[in-house]
């Protein structure tokens, strides 16, 4: 087929633009990316060769070769991996197939520029070549095919593809380096320098399991002084290839761990926490796990694939093995290497195997133990963790509603903002601060701290010095109601009708209100009648201070926010039991009483409806008929 000029897919073009024009501090990452692609390509070939020996073409000496060349101002990275067909080149290099790309570009838009962190999170991979090169030539032959393909681009808008010859299978990528990366005067870095590249390979790619080879010039001085020094070329393997996790923990530097996770799990930033453990005994395994600093952008969506890599005797078995860790630890990345797993069974059976369950349970327990330690010893770091993954724990607690002990395992790791100072507290910390007479743990649901602080029910709690937990995420309320209790104290939402503050002042106020209520039984019944179908009950309350009315929920059943969530799920059979509470100390109450003398009048009905509407508004719920409400207010104002 003749040479063909093609355009990059629009999204790729945008991405390239961003990559080329953004200013990186870390130009050298291109090498890690290309070596990682080469290594992946050899993995693929190796995997295919297990069922098809012929594909190896008689050569199973896998290797990656790097040639920096100052004369031609290039650096060439070759592999003898799987290679690509012409169609694959166009599909893999010309377009962005990855589902995360759209999300990546959205994030870029959000952030305003391409940050290294973003690139790491999403992996720009091959395109990183254009950070340092103004032209990239890729020549590749798919193992088992006879024709090869040459792809070339300057990274602007187009690329060319044409048929060519290539003797050995695999891929060769030639980067035509920009001048500033060739070591000349004023240049930033010299990627044509053998020693520099050797250093980078050791730094970023030491654990790659295939040899990364380079040519080294050796000067041999003759025994005779008259003879000029002889130069010979020696091929050396630069990386150690020893899987990191097989080495002794004490001999591994933090930097080595970081690089490992970056390469192996496409992490950009160094992990927040690293856990390297070995177990001997009935089941032997090594696990190398990490908690990434940032949650995957789709951690809570179905596109996210949790799971650990599985190795047996250092040989890769499978990726994303889901059944090691429970769902609330889905953010943990890493690998397990165990000789004790039954590998000659199907993936499904393996995942159900006793050995895998056992390893998984131990790992999960250890991770939580590590997190407890972090919470106790490094609060700042734990709060960083919480900001990224707290939701996973709260969902975990909620999903445990049908029994199980996730709630028990996680309850001491939960953090909530509270009314104390807006800082995060554990439940234990909250309990330690409870007033002696306080018997329940109070919480309030709202979209943010300000919304909760403005709730009319908050005023008394604040006045009487009771601390309130803020349930700001919709899942918080679900999690707390699943937990039910902590340290033998019930969780009590402050807007349920059964809230009873336990201090003397509140007890006295309650008694007084009860007496007023007794005297006003007919009035309350009349209001209830006027609001039939809207509220279940109408009561007088001592829980308000300056507020005139509030809405509370029945002691059982869903809350108003839950009702909203369920309604959005289209299962509106769950309705909150609403109770209208009126403050008898408010001037409005006297007016209500006066109007009740004429309880069948339109005026009384309107007044009651207004009470209800404002109570709903305080809860953040639009009245059923906003125009009618506005009319009622206007009428009232013109009196
Ligand atoms: P990723 O490696 O995350 O898939 P890249 O941009 O690094 O993304 O690479 C895109 C795709 O191009 C790879 O998935 C692979 O299919 C193909 N590719 C890149 N380099 C090579 C190579 N050396 N050999 C074979 N295929 C390659
Ligand atoms: Mg890649």
Image (cartoon, grey):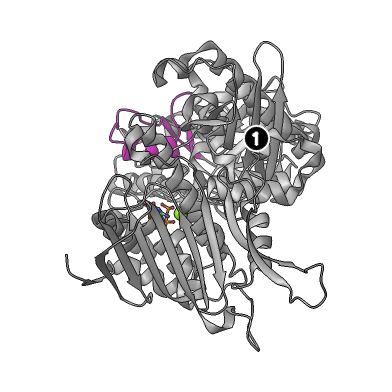
The correct choice, above or below, for 537 with respect to 333 in the image is: above
Q: Is residue 540 visible?
A: no
- Judge by depth and name the residue closer to the eye, 357 or 26: 26
Q: Is mark 1 on a helix, strand or loop?
A: strand
Quarter of the image where the N terminus is located: bottom left
**Residue indicated by mark 1:** 288
Q: Measured from the top left, where is residue 637 in percent x and y? A: 39, 64
Report the magenta residues as a range.
Answer: 552-581
Q: Residue at x 48, y 17 (%)?
A: 402
The correct choice, above or below, for 424 with respect to 158 in the image is: above
Quarter of the image where the C terminus is located: bottom left
| Quarter of the displayed picture in which ligand 1 can be seen | bottom left
- Judge by depth and name the residue closer to the eye, 563 or 312: 312
Q: Measured from the top left, where is residue 295 in percent x and y? A: 54, 47
Task: Spot the residue most to the left.
Answer: 1
- Judge by depth and name the residue closer to the eye, 196 or 224: 224
Q: Measured from the top left, where is residue 6 in percent x and y? A: 23, 71
- Judge by depth and name the residue closer to the eye, 332 or 483: 332
Magenta-colored stretch includes residue 55: no
Q: Is residue 19 left or right of residue 256?
A: left
């Amino acid at each position: 087929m003749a040479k063909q000029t093609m355009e990059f897919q629009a999204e790729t073009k945008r991405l390239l633009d961003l990559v080329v024009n953004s200013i990186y501090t870390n130009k050298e990452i291109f090498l890690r990316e290309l070596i990682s692609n080469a290594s992946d390509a050899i993995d693929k070939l190796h995997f295919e060769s297990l069922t098809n020996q012929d594909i190896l073409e008689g050569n199973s000496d896998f290797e990656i070769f790097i040639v920096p060349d100052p004369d031609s101002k290039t650096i060439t990275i070759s592999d003898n991996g799987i290679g690509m067909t012409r169609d694959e080149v166009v599909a893999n290099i010309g377009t962005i197939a990855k589902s995360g790309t759209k999300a990546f570009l959205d994030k870029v838009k959000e952030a305003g520029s391409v940050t290294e962190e973003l690139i790491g999170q999403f992996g720009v991979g091959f395109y990183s070549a254009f950070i340092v090169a103004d032209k990239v030539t890729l020549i590749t032959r798919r193992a088992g095919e006879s024709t090869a393909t040459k792809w070339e681009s300057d990274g602007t808008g187009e690329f060319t593809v044409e048929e060519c010859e290539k003797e050995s299978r695999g891929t060769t990528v030639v980067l035509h380096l920009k001048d500033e990366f060739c070591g000349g005067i004023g240049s930033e870095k010299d990627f044509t320098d053998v020693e520099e590249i050797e250093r980078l390979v050791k730094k970023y790619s030491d654990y790659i399991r295939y040899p990364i080879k380079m040519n080294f010039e050796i000067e041999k001085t003759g025994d005779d002084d008259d003879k000029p020094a002889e130069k010979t070329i020696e091929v050396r393997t630069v990386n150690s290839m020893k899987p990191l996790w097989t080495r002794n923990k004490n001999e591994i530097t933090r930097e080595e761990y970081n690089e490992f996770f970056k390469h192996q799990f496409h992490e950009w930033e160094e992990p927040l926490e690293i856990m390297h453990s070995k177990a001997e005994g009935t089941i032997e395994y090594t696990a190398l796990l990490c908690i990434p600093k940032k949650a995957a952008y789709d951690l809570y969506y179905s596109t996210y694939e949790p799971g650990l890599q599985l190795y047996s005797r250092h040989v890769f078995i499978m990726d994303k093995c889901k059944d090691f860790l429970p769902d609330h630890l889905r953010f943990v990345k890493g690998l397990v290497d165990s000789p004790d797993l039954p590998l000659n069974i199907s993936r499904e059976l393996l995942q159900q195997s006793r050995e895998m369950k056992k390893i998984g349970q131990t790992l999960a327990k250890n991770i939580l133990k590590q997190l407890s330690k972090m919470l106790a010893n490094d609060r700042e770091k734990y709060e960083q963790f919480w900001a990224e993954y707290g939701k996973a724990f709260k969902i975990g607690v909620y999903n445990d509603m049908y029994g199980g002990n996730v709630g028990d395992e996680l309850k001491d790791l939960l953090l909530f903002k509270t009314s104390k100072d807006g800082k995060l507290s554990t439940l234990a910390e909250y309990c330690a601060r409870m007033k002696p007479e306080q018997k329940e743990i109070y919480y309030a649901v709202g979209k943010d701290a300000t919304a909760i602080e403005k709730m009319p029910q908050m005023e008394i709690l604040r006045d009487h010095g009771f601390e309130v937990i803020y349930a700001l995420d919709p899942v918080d309320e679900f999690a707390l109601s699943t937990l039910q209790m902590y340290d033998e104290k019930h969780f009590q939402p402050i807007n349920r009708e059964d809230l009873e503050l336990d201090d003397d002042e509140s007890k006295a106020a309650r008694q007084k209100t009860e007496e007023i209520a007794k005297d006003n039984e007919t009035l309350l019944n009349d209001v209830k009648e006027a609001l039939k179908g809207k509220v279940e009950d109408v009561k007088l309350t001592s829980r308000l201070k300056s507020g005139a009315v509030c809405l509370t929920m029945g002691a059982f059943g869903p809350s108003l926010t839950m009702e909203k969530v369920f309604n959005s799920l289209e299962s509106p059979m769950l309705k909150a039991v609403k109770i209208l509470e009126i403050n008898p100390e408010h001037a409005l109450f006297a007016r209500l009483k006066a109007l009740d003398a004429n309880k069948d009048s339109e005026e009384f009905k309107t007044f009651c409806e207004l009470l209800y509407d404002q109570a709903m508004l305080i809860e953040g719920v639009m009245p059923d008929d906003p125009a009618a409400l506005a009319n009622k207010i206007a009428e009232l104002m013109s009196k």
